Amino acid sequence: MVTRQQDKQMSNGTEKLLEAIETEHRNTFIVNNKRFMIEKHGGIYFIDNDDELQSIGYSRALSILLPEIDWIYEESGSYQGEWVAVGKDNYNIWYYKRGSYGSCSGCDWYKGINDKEGAINYIKAMMLVDKVGTKEELLKYLENEKNNGWGSIKEAIDKIFKHPNIS
Protein backbone atom coordinates (compact mmCIF):
# COMPACT_ATOMS: atom_id res chain seq x y z
CA MET A 1 0.00 0.00 0.00
CA VAL A 2 1.32 3.43 -0.91
CA THR A 3 1.05 6.20 1.64
CA ARG A 4 2.28 9.76 1.68
CA GLN A 5 5.19 9.75 4.04
CA GLN A 6 8.63 11.15 4.55
CA ASP A 7 11.67 9.15 5.48
CA LYS A 8 13.74 10.37 8.42
CA GLN A 9 16.13 12.36 6.26
CA MET A 10 13.30 14.19 4.51
CA SER A 11 11.57 14.84 7.81
CA ASN A 12 14.73 16.38 9.25
CA GLY A 13 15.06 18.49 6.10
CA THR A 14 11.54 19.82 6.58
CA GLU A 15 12.29 20.74 10.18
CA LYS A 16 15.35 22.64 9.00
CA LEU A 17 13.21 24.50 6.48
CA LEU A 18 11.31 26.03 9.34
CA GLU A 19 14.61 27.40 10.57
CA ALA A 20 15.61 29.06 7.30
CA ILE A 21 18.40 31.51 8.00
CA GLU A 22 17.93 35.16 7.15
CA THR A 23 20.84 36.64 5.23
CA GLU A 24 21.82 40.26 4.73
CA HIS A 25 20.10 40.32 1.34
CA ARG A 26 16.34 40.17 1.83
CA ASN A 27 15.79 37.93 -1.21
CA THR A 28 18.31 35.24 -0.25
CA PHE A 29 17.99 32.52 2.34
CA ILE A 30 19.67 29.28 3.36
CA VAL A 31 17.93 25.92 3.75
CA ASN A 32 19.78 22.69 4.62
CA ASN A 33 23.11 24.46 3.99
CA LYS A 34 21.99 25.37 0.46
CA ARG A 35 21.66 28.99 -0.61
CA PHE A 36 18.64 30.22 -2.55
CA MET A 37 17.57 33.53 -4.02
CA ILE A 38 14.10 34.70 -5.00
CA GLU A 39 14.01 36.18 -8.49
CA LYS A 40 12.20 39.53 -8.51
CA HIS A 41 9.98 38.49 -11.44
CA GLY A 42 9.10 35.13 -9.88
CA GLY A 43 10.89 31.87 -9.27
CA ILE A 44 13.78 30.64 -7.15
CA TYR A 45 17.45 30.27 -7.93
CA PHE A 46 19.88 27.89 -6.27
CA ILE A 47 23.26 29.52 -5.60
CA ASP A 48 25.94 26.87 -6.10
CA ASN A 49 29.41 26.74 -4.49
CA ASP A 50 30.83 28.88 -7.31
CA ASP A 51 28.19 31.58 -6.66
CA GLU A 52 26.53 30.73 -9.97
CA LEU A 53 22.76 31.08 -10.13
CA GLN A 54 20.78 28.08 -11.31
CA SER A 55 17.04 28.23 -11.88
CA ILE A 56 15.61 25.25 -10.04
CA GLY A 57 12.15 24.79 -11.56
CA TYR A 58 10.55 21.43 -10.83
CA SER A 59 13.00 18.77 -12.03
CA ARG A 60 16.07 20.62 -10.75
CA ALA A 61 14.40 21.24 -7.37
CA LEU A 62 14.02 17.53 -6.78
CA SER A 63 17.69 16.88 -7.60
CA ILE A 64 18.91 19.72 -5.38
CA LEU A 65 16.57 19.17 -2.44
CA LEU A 66 16.58 15.36 -2.46
CA PRO A 67 20.00 14.43 -3.87
CA GLU A 68 19.90 10.97 -2.25
CA ILE A 69 17.29 10.00 -4.85
CA ASP A 70 18.14 9.49 -8.53
CA TRP A 71 15.20 11.17 -10.32
CA ILE A 72 13.60 10.53 -13.72
CA TYR A 73 11.48 13.51 -14.78
CA GLU A 74 9.01 13.78 -17.66
CA GLU A 75 6.40 16.32 -18.60
CA SER A 76 3.64 16.54 -21.16
CA GLY A 77 1.80 19.52 -22.54
CA SER A 78 2.84 22.77 -24.15
CA TYR A 79 2.00 26.08 -22.46
CA GLN A 80 0.38 24.18 -19.64
CA GLY A 81 0.76 20.56 -18.67
CA GLU A 82 1.69 18.05 -16.06
CA TRP A 83 4.96 16.56 -14.89
CA VAL A 84 5.81 13.27 -13.25
CA ALA A 85 8.99 12.29 -11.46
CA VAL A 86 10.01 8.91 -10.14
CA GLY A 87 13.23 8.22 -8.32
CA LYS A 88 15.17 5.48 -6.63
CA ASP A 89 17.43 5.75 -3.60
CA ASN A 90 20.49 3.64 -2.72
CA TYR A 91 18.24 1.09 -0.99
CA ASN A 92 16.22 0.51 -4.22
CA ILE A 93 13.18 2.24 -2.77
CA TRP A 94 11.18 4.13 -5.39
CA TYR A 95 9.48 7.52 -4.93
CA TYR A 96 6.85 9.40 -6.89
CA LYS A 97 6.02 13.09 -7.33
CA ARG A 98 3.72 14.84 -9.76
CA GLY A 99 2.61 18.35 -10.47
CA SER A 100 1.50 20.78 -13.12
CA TYR A 101 3.12 23.73 -14.86
CA GLY A 102 2.04 26.74 -16.85
CA SER A 103 3.39 29.58 -18.91
CA CYS A 104 2.77 32.44 -16.46
CA SER A 105 2.79 33.25 -12.76
CA GLY A 106 -1.00 32.94 -12.62
CA CYS A 107 -1.00 29.29 -13.71
CA ASP A 108 2.39 28.06 -12.50
CA TRP A 109 3.26 27.92 -8.82
CA TYR A 110 7.02 28.16 -9.35
CA LYS A 111 6.77 31.19 -11.66
CA GLY A 112 4.47 32.91 -9.19
CA ILE A 113 6.88 32.81 -6.25
CA ASN A 114 7.85 36.35 -5.29
CA ASP A 115 8.56 36.27 -1.56
CA LYS A 116 10.44 34.22 1.02
CA GLU A 117 7.31 32.63 2.48
CA GLY A 118 6.22 31.44 -0.97
CA ALA A 119 9.72 30.12 -1.69
CA ILE A 120 9.89 28.17 1.56
CA ASN A 121 6.40 26.73 0.98
CA TYR A 122 7.48 25.63 -2.50
CA ILE A 123 10.64 23.97 -1.17
CA LYS A 124 8.70 22.19 1.58
CA ALA A 125 6.13 20.92 -0.93
CA MET A 126 8.81 19.70 -3.32
CA MET A 127 10.39 17.69 -0.50
CA LEU A 128 7.13 15.82 0.18
CA VAL A 129 7.18 12.81 -2.08
CA ASP A 130 5.25 9.54 -2.14
CA LYS A 131 7.39 6.65 -0.94
CA VAL A 132 6.17 3.81 -3.16
CA GLY A 133 8.49 0.86 -2.44
CA THR A 134 9.80 -1.70 -4.89
CA LYS A 135 10.00 -1.29 -8.66
CA GLU A 136 7.03 -3.64 -9.06
CA GLU A 137 5.00 -1.51 -6.64
CA LEU A 138 6.04 1.59 -8.59
CA LEU A 139 4.86 0.09 -11.89
CA LYS A 140 1.46 -0.76 -10.36
CA TYR A 141 1.26 2.70 -8.82
CA LEU A 142 2.03 4.37 -12.16
CA GLU A 143 -0.53 2.23 -13.95
CA ASN A 144 -3.15 3.23 -11.39
CA GLU A 145 -2.23 6.91 -11.71
CA LYS A 146 -2.47 6.64 -15.49
CA ASN A 147 -5.84 4.85 -15.40
CA ASN A 148 -7.32 7.37 -12.97
CA GLY A 149 -5.68 10.43 -14.50
CA TRP A 150 -6.69 12.55 -17.43
CA GLY A 151 -5.10 14.71 -20.08
CA SER A 152 -1.38 15.23 -20.14
CA ILE A 153 -0.66 13.20 -16.97
CA LYS A 154 -1.28 10.02 -18.98
CA GLU A 155 1.25 11.12 -21.61
CA ALA A 156 3.86 12.02 -18.96
CA ILE A 157 3.44 8.61 -17.31
CA ASP A 158 3.77 6.90 -20.70
CA LYS A 159 7.13 8.67 -21.12
CA ILE A 160 8.21 7.39 -17.70
CA PHE A 161 7.24 3.83 -18.71
CA LYS A 162 9.51 4.13 -21.77
CA HIS A 163 12.56 5.25 -19.76
CA PRO A 164 15.38 2.63 -19.86
CA ASN A 165 15.56 2.43 -16.04
CA ILE A 166 11.85 1.65 -15.83
CA SER A 167 11.10 -0.58 -18.84
Image (tube, rainbow, N blue to C red):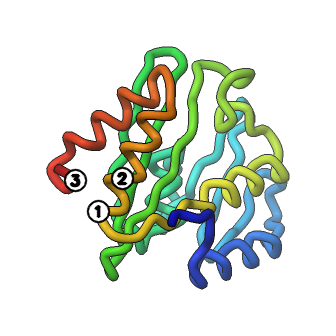
Closest to the observer: 55 or 110? 110
Does residue 33 appear anywhere in the picture?
A: yes
Indicate which label's residue lies in the foreground, 3 or 2. Answer: 2
The image shows residue 92, relative to residue 81, as above or below, that is below
Q: What amino acid type is highlighted by mark number 3? A: Ile
Mark positioned earlier in the residue sequence (1 or 3): 1
- Which mark, residue 34? none
Q: Position of residue 164 (x, y in %)?
A: 15, 50
Horizontal relation, residue 23 to residue 146: left or right:
right
At horizontal 33% and vertical 70% (from top left) the residue drawn is 134
SS at badge 3: loop
Crowding at dot 2, Cα within 10 Å, few <14 / some 14-19 / many 20+, comes out as: few
Q: Which residue is mark 3?
A: 166
Q: How many marks?
A: 3
Q: What is the C-alpha distance between the residues marked 2 and 1?
A: 6 Å
N-terminal of the pair, mark 3 or mark 2, is: 2
Q: Picture quarter containing residue 152?
A: top left
* Amino acid carrying mark 1 in the image: Glu
Q: Residue placed at 16% from the left, 50% from the top? A: 167
The answer to whether mark 2 and mark 1 are in CB contact below 8 A is yes
Left or right of 18 on screen, residue 69? left
Q: Amino acid at mark 2?
A: Lys
Q: Residue at x 49, y 62 (%)?
A: 64
Circle 2 residue: 140
Q: Position of residue 120 (x, y in %)?
A: 76, 57
**In terms of image quadrants, where is residue 126?**
bottom right
Q: What residue sits right under mark 1 in the picture? A: 136
Answer yes or no: is residue 55 visible: no
Q: CA distance from mark 1 to mark 3?
A: 10 Å
Q: CA distance from mark 3 to mark 2?
A: 12 Å
Tag 3 near tag 2, CB within 8 Å: no
